[in-house]
């Protein structure tokens, strides 16, 4: 999870992707990165700034029950 968050942070910084997360109970992604403290459940959405592909970063950190970084189908 740390690696996925670090790669996402770097891709946001270099403009490869944009955070398109809307609403929800998660703190803003930049706050997650700067605080180093994770919520029990993470659910963020990002968009590739080149092709428009959407991605989802999700994890259940409280129990460590898994998570994913996956592309979503285009709408």
Image (cartoon, rainbow, N blue to C red):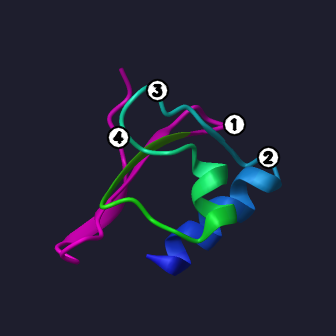
- Distance from disc 2 to disc 4, alpha carbons, whole Å, reads 19 Å
Which residue in the protein does label 1 denote?
A: 49
User: Does label 1 or label 3 sit earlier along the sequence?
Assistant: 3
Above or below, 36 against 53 in this view is below
- Counting residues from the N terminus, which is met first, the one under dot 3 or under dot 4? 3
Distance between the alpha carbons at the discs numbered 1 and 3: 17 Å
Specify the segment rendered in magenta.
Answer: 47-75
Instruction: Please provide percent x and percent y for residue 75.
Output: 36, 20
Q: Are marks 1 and 2 in contact (CB under 8 Å)?
A: yes
What is the distance, in whole Å, between disc 2 and disc 3 at their CAs?
Answer: 19 Å
Circle 3 crowding by C-alpha within 10 Å: few under 14, some 14–19, many from 20: few
Q: Give the residue pinned by disc 2.
A: 15
Instruction: Give the mark nearest the N terminus, 1 or 2.
Output: 2
**Neighbourhood count class around disc 1 (C-alpha, 10 Å): few under 14, some 14–19, many 20 upward:** few
Neighbour class for label 4 at 10 Å: few (<14), some, many (≥20)? few
Q: Nearer the viewer, mark 2 or mark 3?
A: 3
Query: Crowdedness of circle 2 by 10 Å Cα count: few (<14), some, many (20+)?
Result: few
Q: Residue at x 24, y 71 (%)?
A: 62
Name the residue beneath numbered marker 4. 72
**Residue drawn 30% across the image and 61% down it:** 40
Q: Quadrant of residue 70?
A: bottom left
> Is 22 located above or below residue 56 in the figure?
above
Q: Is residue 64 found inside the magenta-colored segment of the image?
A: yes
Q: What residue is shown with label 3?
A: 22
Q: Which residue occupies the foreground of this view, 40 or 55?
A: 40
């Amino acid at each position: 999870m740390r690696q996925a968050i670090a790669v996402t942070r770097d891709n946001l910084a270099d403009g490869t992707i944009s955070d398109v997360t809307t609403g929800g109970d998660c703190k803003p992604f930049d706050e997650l990165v700067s605080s180093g403290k994770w919520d029990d459940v993470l659910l963020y959405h990002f968009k590739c700034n080149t092709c428009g592909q959407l991605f989802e970063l999700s994890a259940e950190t409280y129990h460590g029950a898994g998570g994913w970084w996956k592309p979503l189908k285009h709408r």
